[in-house]
Structures are given as structure tokens and as C-alpha cells.
């Protein structure tokens, strides 16, 4: 597992810019974000993780992965509805996972092109897929492409982490969060990852 090439530079930058965030970063000296290279895997896992806690998402994903054996579009699309359900997946998420599988099987997207796209270009392409909104697309940018400056404003864990770090009242106003995030540019993905890390005993992954 290789850390992103910018990780150590980003840590130094953030520690220098922000004392409180720096304290969190220093608490996890050997932890880092690592990328899953399979686009389908990352997107499927992000769908499973929508609007639930990291712990709950991990439990559902573990059951899902056990049922499907290998997380590939052809295996997911063939999975029986009751097996999906037994993993703890809602009707809506089942339809999203099937839609994602169909999209990949029909080659309606070409993830190999995304490496050369700007973040917003990738987001606009991903949100065309049923069940993928901006948050899920941002998880893809962070966890699959390791883009350094993504700030997912709709992520509740991120907002909680910021509030805990700076003793602010939760929920945090998005405009205020966006303003605060300017001090972490150009490494907002790294800042986000450490705010998540401060909340959970297991690192977030998609």
C-alpha cells in the first residue's frame, strides 16, 4: 500500500498552517490514505456508505462482499434481491448498485479518461449515473484518484470532525466551513481525511 506522493508534503503544510489540525495529524504518524485502483469497487462502496456511519457502512460492506465474492459488475447484477437485502441494503441502494453495474457493463463510462479530467469534469460525468450525487463523486476523487484538494461539504463526519477540533456548534454552516477550508488549500482532501480519522477508530476507506 503506497501513500499518495503528496502526503508527507501535505502533512507538513497543514501542520504549519493550522495548529489544531496539526495536533490531529501528529496523533496518527503512520496512517495515510491509500487508493483502491478499481473504479467500480470504489463507487459501489461509496453507494453503500451513503448517509450512514463509517462503522455501519463497514458492517454492510463486509456482508455484501461476502455474498458477491468478487465486487465486479457482472457479479453484482446477478445477485438475488434477497441476498442484497440480507446485507442490510435498502431498496434504493440495491437499485443504485444495479444501475452502476449496468453502466459499467454497457461501457457508458470510461474511467481511464478521468485521470486527465479536472475534478469538476469528473463530478459532472459521475452524477449522470443513477444513485451518484456530488458526495459519492467526491469520495471517488479522494479514494480512487487521490485528488489532493477535495472538500466534501455534504459529509457529516467531516463537519463533526471540524466542530470537535475547533469547539464549534454542530451542525456547521456550509458557508462557514467553506471559508475555513481555504486555510487547508491545496490539500483539503488530506485535511478531510484527518478530520475523519479523529472520529473513528478505523480509517475511512472506499
Image (cartoon, rainbow, N blue to C red):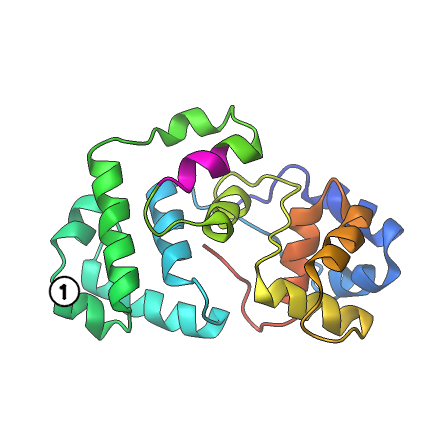
Can you give x and y, in whole percent of width and height, for residue 17 in the image?
Answer: 87, 50
Within the magenta stretch, is there residue 115? no
Residue annotated with mark 1: 81
Across and down, in percent, residue 59 comes to 37, 73
Q: Residue at image x 57%, y 58%? A: 154
Q: Determine the image quadrant of residue 195.
A: bottom right
Most prominent secondary structure in the magenta stretch?
Answer: helix
171 relative to 183, above or below: below
Give the side of residue 92 with respect to residue 22, left or right: left
**Left or right of residue 146, residue 104 in this image:** left
The x and y percentages for residue 14 are: 80, 50
Q: Examine the rendering and report whether any part of residue 173 can be seen.
A: yes
Question: Total marks drawn?
Answer: 1
Dividing the picture into quadrants, the one containing residue 180 is bottom right
Q: Which residues are magenta?
A: 122-128
* Residue drawn at x 20%, y 66% as measured from the top left: 84
- Report the front residue among 70 and 75: 75
Tell me the crowding category of disc 1: few under 14, some 14 to 19, or many 20 or more residues within 10 angstroms, Cα based.
few
Res. 47 image quadrant: bottom left
Q: Is residue 199 above or below residue 43?
A: below
Looking at the image, which residue is at 88% across and 50% down? Answer: 16
Question: From this viewpoint, is residue 72 visible?
Answer: no
Quadrant in which the C terminus is drawn = bottom left
Q: Position of residue 131 (x, y in %)?
A: 35, 52
Q: Which structural element holds mark 1?
A: helix
Horizontal side, residue 42 vs residue 86: left or right: right
Amino acid at each position: 500500500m503506497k501513500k499518495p506522493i503528496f502526503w508527507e508534503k501535505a502533512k507538513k503544510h497543514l501542520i504549519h498552517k493550522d495548529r489544531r489540525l496539526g495536533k490531529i495529524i501528529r496523533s496518527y504518524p503512520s496512517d495515510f490514505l491509500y487508493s483502491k485502483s478499481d473504479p467500480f469497487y470504489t463507487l459501489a462502496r461509496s453507494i453503500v456508505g451513503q448517509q450512514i456511519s463509517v462503522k455501519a457502512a463497514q458492517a454492510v460492506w463486509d456482508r455484501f462482499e461476502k455474498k458477491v465474492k468478487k465486487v465486479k459488475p457482472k457479479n453484482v447484477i446477478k445477485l438475488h434481491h434477497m441476498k442484497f437485502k440480507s446485507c442490510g441494503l435498502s431498496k434504493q441502494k440495491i437499485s443504485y448498485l444495479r444501475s452502476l453495474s449496468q453502466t459499467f457493463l454497457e461501457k457508458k463510462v470510461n474511467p481511464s479518461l478521468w485521470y486527465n479530467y479536472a475534478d469538476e469534469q469528473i463530478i459532472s460525468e459521475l452524477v449522470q449515473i443513477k444513485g451518484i450525487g456530488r458526495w459519492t463523486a467526491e469520495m471517488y476523487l479522494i479514494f480512487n484518484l487521490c485528488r489532493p484538494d477535495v472538500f466534501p461539504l455534504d459529509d457529516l463526519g467531516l463537519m463533526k470532525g471540524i466542530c470537535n477540533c475547533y469547539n464549534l456548534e454542530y451542525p456547521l454552516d456550509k458557508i462557514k466551513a467553506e471559508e475555513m477550508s481555504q486555510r487547508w488549500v491545496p490539500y483539503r482532501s488530506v485535511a478531510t481525511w484527518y478530520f475523519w480519522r479523529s472520529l473513528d477508530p478505523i480509517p475511512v476507506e472506499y
